Image (cartoon, grey):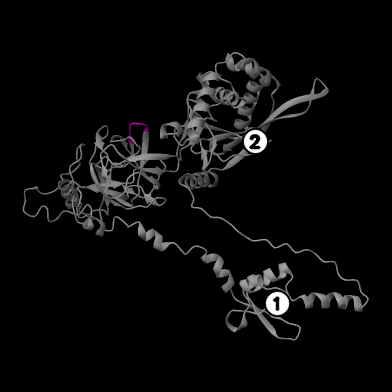
Amino acid sequence: MAEIIRMPKMSDTMTEGVMAKWHKKVGDKIKSGDVLAEVETDKATMDLESYWDGTILYIGVEEGKAVPVDAVIAVVGKEGEDYKALLASEDKPSGAESEPAGKSEDGPDSSAGNAPASGGLSEQDLEKMGVSVIRMPLLSDTMTEGVIAEWHKKVGDKVKDDDILADVETDKATMEVMGYASGTLLHIGVEKGQAAKVNGIIAIVGPEGTDISGILNQGDVKPAASAKEEKPAAGSDARSVDHKEEKAVVSGTGDRVKASPLARRIALEKGIDLTQVAGSADGGRIIKKDVESFKPEAGSTKTEATTGADTGKSAAPVIPQFVGEERFTEKPVSQMRKVIAKRLSESLFTAPHFYLTISVDMDSAISARTAINAVAPVKVSFNDIVIKAVAVALKKHPAVNSSWGGDKIRFNEHTNIGVAMAVEDGLLVPVVRFADGKSLSHISAEVKEYGQKAKAKKLQPSDWEGSTFTVSNLGMFGIDEFTSIINAPDGAILSVGAIQQVPVVKNGAVVPGNVMKLTLGCDHRVVDGATGAAFLQTLKGLLEEPIRLLA
């Protein structure tokens, strides 16, 4: 069945998008994950990915034209499928249409063939009723679903078009979502803490008292309560341990004592003889609570001690028993962690990685940093010096400043350095753009600002897009050296270790020195071993003579 593709909301302030470029044309086959087009928003130009499989039947927006959020931009379906009835129920988009929408709207049967937009009602019907369907917006270029972190409105509240309805947690940050609709909040389709797919219905706004059962019955909205019903009862896994297949324990008289695996383990840890424990389960089977509530009789201990004395043998040493409790906590994977897992897995298992490590004498860099910070308006860190040195070195080695494109390799002439930053839920990589042309103070101020925004989850897509090379520094944690997974589509990543005070040989004498290890991770499809080694040699020279960075 043909499906309509609408202009997604790609940022929290986006109201319309400009179709910068189409990557597909009418008749092309597409599958989920294909890039359909590039859309220019108020923040950046982003790729519009397909969530559909099929054939492009219709394109309704020309390149360079702007259309509002949620407007029809294309139709996908089976090859040769009739989609005109579906378009007839929609307002025509602002761009030029590749084909007429269908029969005249004045015809007596024109409305009868209209495919329902929601719950059997067309978009025109909903508009006449004053009902607005609020969908999960696309808030970042890698977002596929969002988690409702907080609802700021509840069902029955009056809302205006500029009110903030909810906070949505994406894979990058927590952002505010506006409804762009006025009226009464009639329905909330996703509970706090639950996820919704991009473009999925999360709320409905309209006149108070409006019957929305027709929209809900369409099946596009799943009541939030159903999410509760699907959850298993808390603690069910723990309770099931007591009901595993029972095993028999043989007593001294030859009788078989039945006990659950958990009961036997606890008895072993506490030194309890199961033959003395009365089972409370079916057939006298011993379970966990029987062992935990068991209290040995005083006489049994006395008898054992006396027996040892009567035989003239020394009693075995008493080993104190320690009883621990196995516990664990589980929590849902955050949107950020999901995307980190997906993107890094794709990078590691797609790009053939190899690593090169070099040691750098940091004595001159330490002296230079002290002198710079004596006069600089912003305190410069060793990481800032590394970023600047990397950017300068990349200008001399463009092959390292490249990315794999399948049938072509892109050699970037600009140096946009991604700076890996650890945050509570994972990792973010904001980008210092044109770093080779910026002063150390400028780079330092920019990195500090990104760090504050990252911790506050205020980074925007424009802050993390467009890197050509990435620097990951764990030196502040005392890590000597490590390897990193390449941040696709970059062709390389630099791992920066701590500055270590070690003995070094200078002028034939062993003297104290300050050494830092750098490890370059390379995508072997674009960077060869000799190329990476030459880059590291240049980088080493810049860091050991940092005055060259100021030239």
The three-letter code of the residue at mark 1 reads Leu
Q: Nearer the viewer, residue 447 or 41?
A: 447
Residue 473 placement, left or right of 9: right
In the rendered image, residue 149, in percent from the top left (x then y), is placed at 41, 46
> Measuring 64% from the left and 61% from the top, which residue is drawn there?
325
Look at the picture and state if 306 lies above or below 482.
below
In the image shown, does 7 or 441 lie closer to the viewer?
A: 441
Above or below, 185 relative to 244:
above
Q: Is residue 418 left or right of residue 517?
A: left
The residue tagged with tag 2: helix, strand or loop?
A: helix
Residue under label 2, please give it: 477
For label 1, the residue is: 274
Q: Which residues are magenta?
A: 39-44
Residue 41 in magenta?
yes
- Frontmost of labels 2 and 1 is 1
Residue 389 visible in rendering: yes
Give x and y (percent) for residue 100: 15, 44
Q: Quadrant of the C terminus?
A: top right
Among numbered discs 2 and 1, the one appearing first in the sequence:
1
Q: Is residue 314 magenta?
A: no
The answer to which of 288 and 351 lies nearer the viewer is 288
